[in-house]
């Protein structure tokens, strides 16, 4: 008989308290996807390079593949599923800031964090922040334009 070292933890995700079983080594990405059924954060490189797994924790972008689920206890986690009609989402559509779409949710979450934290960001700040995510389809210009359009309207 194998004994599982799991504990029930409470996470505050998308404005709701959620109970989930987690092992000490479970990443937030794993728990969001497999434990809570929130599949918007994507597994990509799973070493923090690509940003497809980006979510917001207390308004700051974090790579959920590098964050232990236990580290999220006591913090507000927002996934793409919890970002309801944010202007950045419409801006991605208006500027065609995606192609295949795999990286899109991570980029949107990173951009939302940028908008929250730097509402007066200039092109240099935008460029620096966008380096945290990778788009293999090369939609960087359109993503930059989407962020700029939201910042101009705030």
Image (cartoon, rainbow, N blue to C red):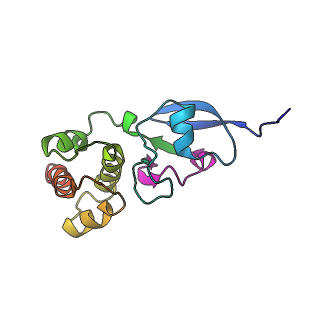
Quick check: is 75 in the magenta stretch? no
Q: How many marks can you see? A: 0
Describe residue 54's horizontal placement relative to residue 67 as left or right. Answer: left
* Up-down relation of residue 62 to residue 124 (above or below): above
* Up-down relation of residue 13 to residue 130 (above or below): above
Which quadrant is the N terminus positioned in?
top right
At 14% across and 51% down in the image, what residue appears?
Answer: 149
Q: Nearer the viewer, residue 86 or 105?
A: 105
Q: Nearer the viewer, residue 73 or 23?
A: 23
Image quadrant where residue 92 sits: top left
* Up-down relation of residue 127 to residue 9 (above or below): below
Residue 129 appears at what percent x and percent y? Answer: 32, 62
Residue 107 appears at what percent x and percent y? Answer: 32, 50
* Up-down relation of residue 30 to residue 46 (above or below): above
At 51% across and 58% down in the image, what residue appears?
Answer: 47
Residue 40 appears at what percent x and percent y? Answer: 40, 37
Range of residues picked out in magenta: 56-74
Describe residue 37's horizontal placement relative to residue 118 as left or right. Answer: right
Quick check: is 63 in the magenta stretch? yes
Residue 16 appears at what percent x and percent y? Answer: 50, 31
Q: Which of 41 and 75 is in front in this view?
A: 41
At 39% across and 35% down in the image, what residue appears?
Answer: 82
């Amino acid at each position: 008989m194998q004994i599982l070292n799991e504990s029930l933890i409470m996470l505050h995700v998308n404005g709701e308290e959620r109970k989930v079983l987690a092992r000490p080594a479970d990443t937030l990405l794993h728990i969001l996807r497999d434990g809570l059924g929130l599949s918007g954060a994507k597994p990509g490189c799973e070493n923090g390079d690509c940003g497809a797994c980006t979510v917001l924790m207390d308004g700051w972008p974090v790579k959920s593949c590098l964050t232990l689920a236990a580290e999220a206890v006591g913090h507000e986690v927002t996934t793409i599923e919890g970002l309801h009609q944010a202007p950045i989402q419409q801006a991605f559509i208006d500027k065609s800031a995606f192609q295949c779409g795999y990286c899109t949710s991570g980029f949107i979450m990173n951009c939302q964090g940028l908008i929250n934290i730097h509402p007066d960001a200039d092109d240099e700040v935008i460029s620096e922040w966008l380096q945290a995510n990778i788009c293999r389809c090369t939609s960087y210009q359109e993503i930059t334009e989407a962020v700029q359009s939201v910042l101009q309207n705030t």
